[in-house]
Image (tube, coloured by chain):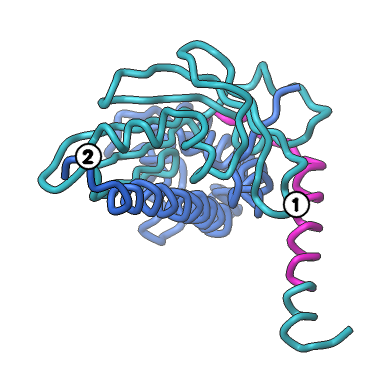
Chain colours: A cyan, B blue
Amino acid sequence: MNTNRIEKRIELKAPISRVWRAITNHIEFGQWFQVKLEGPFVPGGVARGQLTYPGYEHYKWEAVIQKMEPETYFSFTWHPYAIDSTADYSKEPPTLVEFRLEGIEGGTLLVLTESGFERIPAGRRPEAFRMNDRGWTEQMKNVERHVTGSQ
Amino acid sequence: MSSATSQGASSGRPALQRAHADVFAALGDETRLQLVGRLCEGEPLSISDLSRGSRLTRQAVTKHLRVLEKVRLVRGTRRGRKMLFRLAPRPIEDARKYLGHVSLVWDRTLARLKTLVESAERDNPQNPK
């Protein structure tokens, strides 16, 4: 049992160069990650943007780009839960997200890991969660209204 | 200010992550994971039971149990003169569910990546296969 780490393996029917571009070009990254980024990824640099996920457009997104080894390895660290804009998360340990690419027959194997959940400090009950929770409750109500035809 | 979240992730990942952070921290230790493993067998165990057959001293076991108790992974109940410890399954279950959720968010996110790279491939015949 590993409670501190996520690993995903996915086979993509596209050449490694194509996959590399999709994960490291900030505009393409934004398309599937659903975030509008301000500028290109630079190792050691901070990538900032705004979520584009419907209902969450007011949330900011931020990550620190760690390594970019062309067509092989890409990593960033972030505070995936840090959406309270008044809080300072900079001193807290982030999780590490890593993408590893490997050429396989007919395409590319992508191995994604997210690790470091055990270092996340305890006991922070975020305002942001309540906002999220309300957001979803509201959306569920919209769906319900829609399908039941009430109001 | 430094804020970050992924999309779909916004649906509850922040909450869950914070709520279970202490559980992850407690389990992020080889020795405690071992103790949890022993307690997983089901029988309530005393400190002597837990130190027997391991390299841990009673003091070490006590110290680690205290950490596990604090995050409510383990519950101690007095039986006669000794304390017996058992797993409190809820936090473990919660932590497992949480990672399940994070995992699901990644599945969805990577599915969008797959759609993007594979459709671009079809749309652009100049790209080598």
What is the chain identity of the residue bearing mark 1? A
Residue A146 visible in the picture: yes
Q: Is residue B129 left or right of residue B27?
A: left
- Residue B128: horizontal and vertical position, in percent? 17, 40
> Residue at 32% of width from left, 52% of height from top?
B123
Residue at the spot of label 2: A15
Please rate how many residues cluster around mark 2, counting C-alpha atoms within 10 Å: few if below 14, some from 14 to 19, many from 20. many
Q: Quadrant of the C terminus of chain B?
A: top left
Secondary element at tag 2: loop
**Amino acid at circle 2:** Pro
Which chain's residue wears label 2?
A
Q: Residue at x 36, y 29 (%)?
A: B56
Give the answer, above or below, for where B26 lies relative to A56: above
Secondary structure, mark 1, is helix
Read off the residue under disc 1: A132
Task: Give the foreground label among 1 and 2.
Answer: 2
Q: Is residue B12 above or below residue A21?
A: below
Alpha-carbon distance for marks 1 and 2? 38 Å
| Front residue of B40 and A85 | A85
What are the residue bounds of the magenta stretch?
A119-141
Considering every residue shown, the one lying at the far left of the view is: A105
Q: Give me the residue at 23% from left, 42% from top.
A: B126
